[in-house]
Image (cartoon, rainbow, N blue to C red):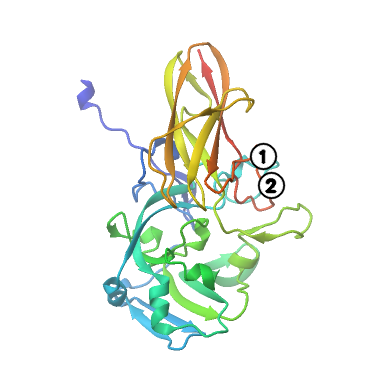
Amino acid sequence: MSNSQQPEVKPYLITKTLVPENQETPIHFINGDFVSKRLFYRRNHFPYPNFASSFYFLPIEGLVHNPKVFSLQEIYSLPSKTIKVVLECSGDKRELFKPKVYGEQWGKGAISQGIWKGVPLRSLLEYTGLLDTAKEIVFEGHDYGERPDSNQLFSFSRSLPIEKALDPDTIIAYEYNNHPIPFKHGFPLRLIIPGWYAMASVKWVKKIIVIDKEFKGPFQAVDYVYYPNKENDSGKFPVTTINVNSTIKYPLNRQLLPSGVYDINGIAWTGKGHIAKVEISFNGGQTWDTCQLTSSSEKYAWVCWIYKWEALKKGEYTILSKATDSKGHVQPLEPMWNRKGYGYNALDSIKVKIE
C-alpha cells in the first residue's frame, strides 16, 4: 500500500464523562485558528435539554419598560455581528494544580476557538429598555438537573453586570463558523461573552431576566468563584476575565525525539488586550528567547507562535513557554491556587528527551 493510499488518521475528542457529556479538545493536533464543531470541547453540568426549536422564543422580562418575546426570525433579521472568540473553560488545566483539587480533571484541551455570529444583546435591550434600578441581567439556559450539593433541580443560570451585558461585543449568537450553532454547543441561541471564561457564555438561552440585586444562583454564588483559602471562604471573588496563558502544542510532553531541528509551536491568549509576546526557556526560566508570532494578534482570539529549536545534543530538556499581553499581564511561575481549581495559567512546561 503506497503512502498516498494510507487511511487518514484523525484526532478525536478526549472523553472525561459521558452524562453529562464532558470532552476535551485534542489541542495538540489542532492547526491554525479554527476548531471544527466535531473537535470543539464539550462542557456540561447536566444532560442535554429537550425542546422543539421550531417554536423557540426568547423572552426578556423583569425590570424593563417593555417586556418582549423575540422569535428566532426576528433575531435573525436584526443587524448581526461576527467575532472570532476563544472559549476557555475556567477549569482548563485543572489537573495541573498542586496540591490537586476536586472537579472535572481537565488537561490542556478545555479550550477552542472559532467565529460566532449573532445579535448584540444591547440591540435586543433597546426594544425593552432598562429601568434605572436594573443592576444585573440573568440568563437562564434550557439545561437543568440536580447538583451534587443539593437534591433540588436547578437550571444552568448566570448573570452579568449591566455594563458587561451592554458591551457591544456581548452577543446572542446563532451561528458558529458560518453554520447554525451545533446543538451540543447551544443551538439555537447561545450567549457569547468574549474575554471571559466560558461558563459566562450560557448555552440554549431560555430567557433573560433583568434584576435589581446580585444574582445568587449556585453557578454564580457557589461555583465559578475563586476560593484562595483551603480552610474557609475568606478572600473569595468571582471568576470573570480569562488570564493570560499559553500552551505548547508540539513537541508532546515526554516525547522521545532523534537529534535535529524542530519547530516548537503553540498558542497564547488573554482576556483583555492582546498577546504582545511569547517567550521560551530551556534552562528553567533563567534566560528567555522570543518566539515568532505566526498569526495576527486579534482581540479575543489566540495567536499561534513558533520557535526553531536546534536540538543537537542528546539529553533531557524541560521547555517552558511564557506569554505577555498588551496590558502587561505575564504568565506566572506558579498558578494562583484555589479550592475549585479555576483560572490555571502558570508557565506551560513540557519535558522532551533527545536520543
Give the crowd class for mark 2: few <14, some 14-19, many >=20 residues within 10 Å: many
Can see residue 156? Answer: no
Amino acid type at mark 1:
Glu
Where disc 1 sits, the SS reads loop
Name the quadrant of the N terminus. top left
Q: Nearer the viewer, residue 182 or 121?
A: 121
Give the crowd class for mark 1: few <14, some 14-19, many >=20 residues within 10 Å: few
Residue 316 is situated, as x and y percent measured from the top left of the image, at 57, 17
Residue 69 is situated, as x and y percent measured from the top left of the image, at 38, 83
Instruction: Identify the residue shown where x is 48% and y is 12%.
Output: 312
Can see residue 206? Answer: yes
As drawn, 253 above or below 107: above
Q: Are marks 1 and 2 in contact (CB under 8 Å)?
A: yes
Residue 334 numbered tag: 1
Q: Nearer the viewer, residue 173 or 322?
A: 322
Residue 153 is situated, as x and y percent measured from the top left of the image, at 56, 72
Disc 2 designates what residue?
A: 337
Most extreme residue toward the right is: 231
Amino acid type at mark 2:
Trp
Instruction: Identify the residue shown where x is 25% and y is 30%.
Output: 7
As drawn, 11 above or below 40: above
Where disc 2 sits, the SS reads loop
Q: Nearer the viewer, residue 283 or 203?
A: 283
User: CA separation, marks 1 and 2?
Assistant: 8 Å
